[in-house]
């Protein structure tokens, strides 16, 4: 119901502003709403309805065309634009939804070799820890040494007295 009211409101505004002032981008609002509520099929149906409402508003506002087919040519362009809005919003929403979910690479048991510390991927390959992070978590590890390991390394080298914290 909200989508139909929004389409009708867009048509009314389009009619009131006349054919000289284009407000066809305003029709994107009901198209986005229809994709949110009804998915891509509902968005496509709303795109067709928006095109028909645009034709009615344009002709009803007194726009006379030199050739009869020009109104349909312009309507085809509006329909293509409306279809691009529907498909674009659908894919943008899907991409944002995919990025909002945590990566499943760290869900459940993670096989780690006790000797070389490589991580077993689902495809059967064993990857270095850094490679696994880059591939599955989208992050780039930076080499650092924690304070405990630094003290241990300096102690092994004989620079400082060995301290056992671990």
Image (cartoon, helix red, strand yellow):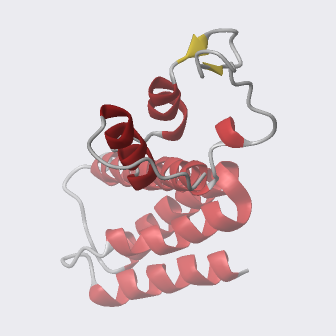
- For the residue pair 74 and 151, the one nearer the viewer reads as 151
In percent of the image, x 72 and y 61: which residue is there? 38
Q: Residue furthest right?
A: 108
Q: Total label count? A: 0
- For the residue pair 124 and 38, the one nearer the viewer reads as 124
Could you say where residue 65 lies in the image, as x and y percent from the top left?
Answer: 23, 59
The answer to which image quadrant residue 20 occupies is bottom left
In percent of the image, x 56 and y 81: which residue is there? 6
Could you say where residue 63 lies in the image, as x and y percent from the top left?
Answer: 26, 71
- For the residue pair 150 and 146, the one nearer the viewer reads as 150
144 to the left or right of 10: left
- For the residue pair 50 and 146, the one nearer the viewer reads as 146
Q: Residue furthest bottom?
A: 16
From what the image shows, is residue 51 above or below residue 140? below
The answer to which image quadrant residue 34 occupies is bottom right
- Answer whether residue 3 is visible to the viewer in this image: yes
72 to the left or right of 37: left
From what the image shows, is residue 156 above or below residue 35? above
112 to the left or right of 58: right
Q: Quadrant of the N terminus?
A: bottom right
In percent of the image, x 53 and y 65: which residue is there? 31
- Answer whether residue 143 is visible to the viewer in this image: no
From what the image shows, is residue 71 above or below residue 15? above
The answer to which image quadrant residue 73 occupies is top left
From what the image shows, is residue 24 above or below residue 142? below
Could you say where residue 68 lies in the image, as x and y percent from the top left?
Answer: 31, 50
Could you say where residue 66 lies in the image, as x and y percent from the top left?
Answer: 19, 55
């Amino acid at each position: 119901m909200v989508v139909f009211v929004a389409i009708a409101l867009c048509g009314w505004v389009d009619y009131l502003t006349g054919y000289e002032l284009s407000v066809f981008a305003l029709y994107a609002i009901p198209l986005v709403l229809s994709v949110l509520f009804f998915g891509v099929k509902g968005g496509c149906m709303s795109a067709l309805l928006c095109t028909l409402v645009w034709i009615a508003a344009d002709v009803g506002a007194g726009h006379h065309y030199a050739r009869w087919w020009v109104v349909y040519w312009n309507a085809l362009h509006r329909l293509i634009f409306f279809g691009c809005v529907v498909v674009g919003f659908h894919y943008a929403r899907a991409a944002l939804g995919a990025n909002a979910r945590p990566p499943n690479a760290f869900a459940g048991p993670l096989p780690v070799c006790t000797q070389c510390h490589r991580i077993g991927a689902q495809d059967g390959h064993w990857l270095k820890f850094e490679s696994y992070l880059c591939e599955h978590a989208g992050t780039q590890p930076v080499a650092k040494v924690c304070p405990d390991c630094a003290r241990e390394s300096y102690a092994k080298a004989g620079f400082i007295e060995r301290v056992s914290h671990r």
